[in-house]
Image (cartoon, helix red, strand yellow):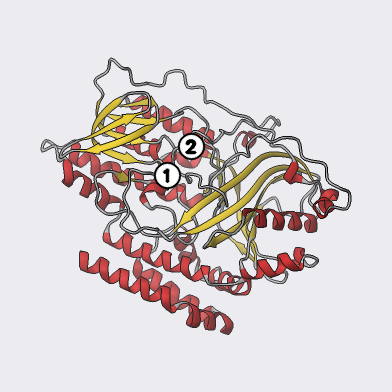
């Protein structure tokens, strides 16, 4: 579950921030340590560009009808840019011998986490990023159990809710007994940087990669500052639209998640401070908006909310998945109507989130000369948009595979190294499971509001082992098959009819792809 932008793509979650994306700033409101960062569960963040003062509207203009609750769409975000203070960052010098074991493109969470893990094996790494000390512009959140066992990363949560809430409609509400947390992205980045530096084998180059060329046993990397690096392996963590990773299918036929979110000071809000709102599918706020109601019935959106205290809350209107992408302006209109109905008076907008997450589509061609991780490598969950925790867990697996090749006396390089790296990220069983998650996305694309409500009503009634595992990409293909049977049995009769009439084409495609994977192995 995450986001999208109607006009242009933004590199997702675990990628290098675009040079055109402004970094977040520390929130100026004391106290509360969590104000320094607002991570989002899995999506993207792009602060809105500086705009001219809002134009005056005629008093009878329909756009002014939300003025009772503040026209928050016209409020300017109060945060500016921030650069992390890290005085001893090891940087590449022109006088250095620019030959490394691994070059990582991007110093986002995926790139830094992999660099940290490679440094544990003494692997010589260079991270190339146009702004390695900029605060990450993306917001991250995760189920607390997803980061348990990943070293000391659990310490990077700065706010936790013991439960989550899903509003199916005005009459049905689910309470999920699974703690959810917001990650302090500044603390996480500082921790990863400190680990990279303390292990002594990671250096950084402030530049943008322009070209990557591959030879038999090494690759050359050309940057915009004139630097030329050489490495045994190139790992790309620069985002979904990277030009350095090849795909076997074009166009990639992805689904898209779009959202508009704000961190806001409000007069009050109606949400329980001990529960984050994972999904609110209610549509009573559209009672006086017949056009919005009709549109929402066909292409539904939900509210995602993190209540920090009675006057500070993160609110985000989200289209779970659509193809083609739902209009961004439509999402904003629905959010205005929802907050007006809830009586939420926005006093200040501290941060604005406008983002897009491409979901599903084909995996990169496996294997190939450059290795992709994060959004670049297809780690975005096709049905939900979640990615950060999954990539954090996969980085040690990839690092071990690389270390076993470059750290061995045989010095395994070239195609054998590339094949082992890709296999570590995408073994046969994981590729098969992804086909099933992609089938879930295709199913969701075909459901209207009623079908979507019925789906999640049955989904969150499953044994927690199954819905936990599905959202966290932990289920095997056999467990996913059992989940499907259980979900079908729990579904209402109209939902079963939806599945029978709308799902055969994506089901056939999934079975065909599974057969191809089986033949390839």
Furthest toward the right, the residue is 59
Q: Quadrant of residue 29?
A: top right
| Label 2 secondary element | loop
Left/right placement of residue 194 relative to residue 51 reads left
Using a 10 Å C-alpha cutoff, classify the residue at mark 1 as few (fewer than 14 neighbours), some (14 to 19) or many (20 or more): many
Q: Residue 7: in sight, yes or no?
A: yes
* Percent x, y of residue 225: 37, 24
Q: Front-most of 52 and 487?
A: 52
Q: Mark 2 touching mark 1, by CB under 8 A?
A: yes
In the picture shown, does residue 127 fall above or below 452?
A: above
Left/right placement of residue 510 relative to residue 384 reads left
The residue pinned by badge 2 equals 18
The residue pinned by badge 1 equals 239
* Residue located at (21% from left, 68% from top): 519
Q: Front-most of 22 and 314?
A: 22
Q: Quadrant of residue 76?
A: top right
Q: Quadrant of the C terminus?
A: bottom left
């Amino acid at each position: 579950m995450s986001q999208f932008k109607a006009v242009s793509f933004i590199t997702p979650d675990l990628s290098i921030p675009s040079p055109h994306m402004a970094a977040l700033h520390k929130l100026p409101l004391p106290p509360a340590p969590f104000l320094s960062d607002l991570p989002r569960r899995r999506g993207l963040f792009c602060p809105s560009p500086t705009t001219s003062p809002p134009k005056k509207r005629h008093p009878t203009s329909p756009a002014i009808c939300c003025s009772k609750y503040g026209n928050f769409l016209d409020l300017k975000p109060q945060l500016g840019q921030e650069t992390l203070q890290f005085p001893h960052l090891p940087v590449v010098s022109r006088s250095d011998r620019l030959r490394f074991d691994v070059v990582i493109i991007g110093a986002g969470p995926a790139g830094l986490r992999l660099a940290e893990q490679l440094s544990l094996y003494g692997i010589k790494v260079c991270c190339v990023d146009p702004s390695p000390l900029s605060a990450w512009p993306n917001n991250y959140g995760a189920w607390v159990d997803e980061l348990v066992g990943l070293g000391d990363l659990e310490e990077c949560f700065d706010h936790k809710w013991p439960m989550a809430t899903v509003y199916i409609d005005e009459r049905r509400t689910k309470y999920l007994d699974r703690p959810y947390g917001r990650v302090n992205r500044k603390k996480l980045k500082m921790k990863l940087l400190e680990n990279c530096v303390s292990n002594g084998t990671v250096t950084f180059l402030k530049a943008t990669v322009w070209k990557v060329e591959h030879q038999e046993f090494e690759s050359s990397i050309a940057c915009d500052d004139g630097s030329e690096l050489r490495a045994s392996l190139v790992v790309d963590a620069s985002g979904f639209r990277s030009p350095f990773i090849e795909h076997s299918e074009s166009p990639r036929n992805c689904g898209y998640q779009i959202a508009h979110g704000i961190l806001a000071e409000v007069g009050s809000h109606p949400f329980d401070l001990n529960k984050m709102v994972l999904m609110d599918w209610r549509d009573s706020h559209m009672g006086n908006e017949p056009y919005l109601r009709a549109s929402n019935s066909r292409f539904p959106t939900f509210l995602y909310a993190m209540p920090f205290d009675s006057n500070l809350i993160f609110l985000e209107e989200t289209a779970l998945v659509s193809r083609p992408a739902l209009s961004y302006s439509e999402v904003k209109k629905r959010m205005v109507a929802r907050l007006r109905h809830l009586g939420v008076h926005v006093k200040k907008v501290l941060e604005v989130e406008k983002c897009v997450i491409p979901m599903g589509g084909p995996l990169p061609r496996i294997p190939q000369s450059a290795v992709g991780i994060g959004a670049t490598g297809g780690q975005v969950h096709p049905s939900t948009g979640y990615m950060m925790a999954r990539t954090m867990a996969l980085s040690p697996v990839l690092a071990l595979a690389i270390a076993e090749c470059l750290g061995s006396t045989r010095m395994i390089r070239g195609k054998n190294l590339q094949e082992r790296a890709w296999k570590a990220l995408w073994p046969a069983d994981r590729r098969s499971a992804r086909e099933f998650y992609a089938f879930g996305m295709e199913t969701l694309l075909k459901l209207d509001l009623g079908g979507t409500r019925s789906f999640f009503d049955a989904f969150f009634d499953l044994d927690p082992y199954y819905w936990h595992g599905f959202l966290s990409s932990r289920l095997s293909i056999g467990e996913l098959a059992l989940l499907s049977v259980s979900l079908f049995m729990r579904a209402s009769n109209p939902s079963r009819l939806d599945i029978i009439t709308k799902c055969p084409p994506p089901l056939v495609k999934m079975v065909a792809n599974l057969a191809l994977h089986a033949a390839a192995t």
